[in-house]
Image (cartoon, coloured by chain):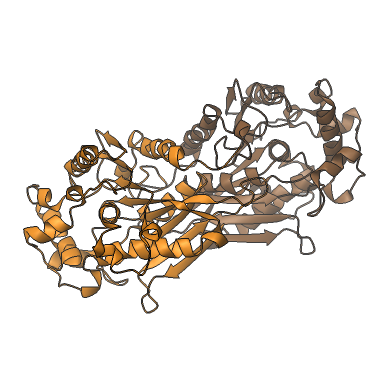
Chain colours: A orange, B brown
Amino acid sequence: MLVQTFKLYEDREDVTLTAYVLDDSTELLNGKRRPAVLICPGGAYLACSDREAEPVALRFASMGYHAFVLRYSTYLEAEEPFEMIFQGIEKRERTVFPTAMHEIGKSLLLIREHASEWLVDSERIALCGFSAGAHNVATYAVYWNQPIVTDYFNASPQELRPTVAILGYPITDYVYMKETKMDERGAQLFKAANVSLLGEEVPNDQKLEQVSPARHVTSDTPPMFIWGTAADSLVPIGHSTRMATALADHEIPFELHIFEEGVHGLSLATQATASSLTLIDEHAEKWINLVEKWLEKRFKLEIE
Amino acid sequence: MLVQTFKLYEDREDVTLTAYVLDDSTELLNGKRRPAVLICPGGAYLACSDREAEPVALRFASMGYHAFVLRYSTYLEAEEPFEMIFQGIEKRERTVFPTAMHEIGKSLLLIREHASEWLVDSERIALCGFSAGAHNVATYAVYWNQPIVTDYFNASPQELRPTVAILGYPITDYVYMKETKMDERGAQLFKAANVSLLGEEVPNDQKLEQVSPARHVTSDTPPMFIWGTAADSLVPIGHSTRMATALADHEIPFELHIFEEGVHGLSLATQATASSLTLIDEHAEKWINLVEKWLEKRFKLEIE
């Protein structure tokens, strides 16, 4: 396996794409190309969680797919403590929408540039995100062939196209989020996330609507696999059901798995990704097996 | 993840240990140590199969364990075609028992030497083998504290001790194998394997008995997880049941899963490790989930 990290901007250390490229062998695909999965960790656009990065990449790699982790633009710098966001924060130009979304496009282009060298099947690249990372993925998935993306790149829509998208406990509707009751700490967290993504704590409805992928599904939106927990008290499961409703209404193929129990941020829901016992869930951990079977339908390796 | 390959002998390229060491993070174990799994691929002591190497390592890595692949001494040199073994082969001193078994000990010492640097929990290292690799693992598991191992190393038994062993479609009883009916190609394959492991096509009973781990289980043999398929026409499942019987008789904890269908050499039994469709099995692929749960009982990560 080749493990290599690329900077997406020459002058910045914080935005990176880490490649986990599988070794080929005459006993395996013998030169044939493999699909890939590009992972966006969550972290409220304030940071990118390690819990939703390498361990998830390795699980997809163990399915026979190349894996990539994108650490997109988020608010906090390396040395800044997470707690500072509770003191109120100022807009930083480098994190404001659509920057993080564009970085998914940059990553797809980088992967496709290396496709021959790494034996990546450019026609089959999944995006997989968690929480804010799932929001980033969902937003890219509805905008990938719209001017907000295509005007930024000197690339064909085909090079920017995501094949499918996998959303774990996503945020998909910022207008709906306005109605959501949350505790004081949750409210402060989302205000900080808003400063990062939209430049202000309380953005107007037009801005909120623009970053609500559940309101922008088109016939070009790729098939999706969505999962979450009904008990999620930070990002209500209504974000998942609203996205699924939009996909259903547009006849986009999708699969939705909502587990009754389980907190926000489960990642693989196993000890491999848990920082505390509440993040281990024997039932919800089955999502990865479900997505493995769902992916196999579209990402079957060329084996005879 | 750190991926690094070590030569076990300075002057040989063919015997290597490849480390897949997980990145730690303040969000993950924050400096606490992880258990490890050392994998021995199969290949009839003639080669080491890529199908039972990196993809398996990545699956164990995705459980939160460091993984290592040992390419132990086998007969064929890099450029030699597998088919040559069907023309009859001559003894090569560098592959004869107990060389490959000693290389497991060398690997454990190497891993334990780097334990602080890699954050490996030296008290919890599993051996995992397939077919001939499972034979190598099983043999080491019964001999690790016997003179045939300890006299070779300048090390304490504690440094050489395997915590548990995982055997996939193993060979465990060469005396029983004498009774096994096989087709001409199978018979030739085992004759070649005998030349590699024991220096001659038809070794005497004393030699066969010595390399039959099912006949050497002691109270110091580690707990084992064994799996295979009843339909295996190359290595009869009787090797697995005989090993399990010996473990039961010695009151060694073990788990045994025999799937009714499935050919020899399934590895993960998914597309990640298949070179042909016969090596994909939707039922037998569950062994890895079963071993994941079995391992968790002993290899639980320190999460509170």
Q: Is residue A19 left or right of residue B8?
A: left
Q: Residue at x 40, y 55 (%)?
A: A38
Q: Position of residue B60 (x, y in %)?
A: 52, 45
Q: In which image quadrant can residue A259 be found?
A: top left
Q: Is residue A26 above or below residue B132?
A: below
Q: Can you see residue B125?
A: no
Where residue B272 sits in the image (x, y, percent)? 55, 42
**Residue drawn at (11%, 55%), measured in percent from left and top?**
A187
Q: What's the residue at 37%, 79% (across, down)?
A: A11
Observer able to see residue B254: yes
Count of all numbered marks drawn on residues in the image: 0
Q: Nearer the viewer, residue A139 or A78?
A: A139
Vertical placement of residue B156 versus B243, above or below: below
Q: Quadrant of the N terminus of chain A?
A: bottom right
B116 and A225: which one is in front? A225
Residue A294, picture quadrant: top left
Of all residues shown, which one is farthest toward the bottom? A11
Decide which of A125, B134 is in the foreground and name it.
A125
Left or right: residue B200 versus residue A63 is: right
Residue at image position (88%, 30%) is B206
Query: Residue A140 versus residue A171: which sits nearer the camera?
Result: A140
Residue B233, percent across and down? 72, 24
Image coordinates for residue A180, horizontal then vertical, percent: 9, 47
Image quarter of the C terminus of chain A: top right
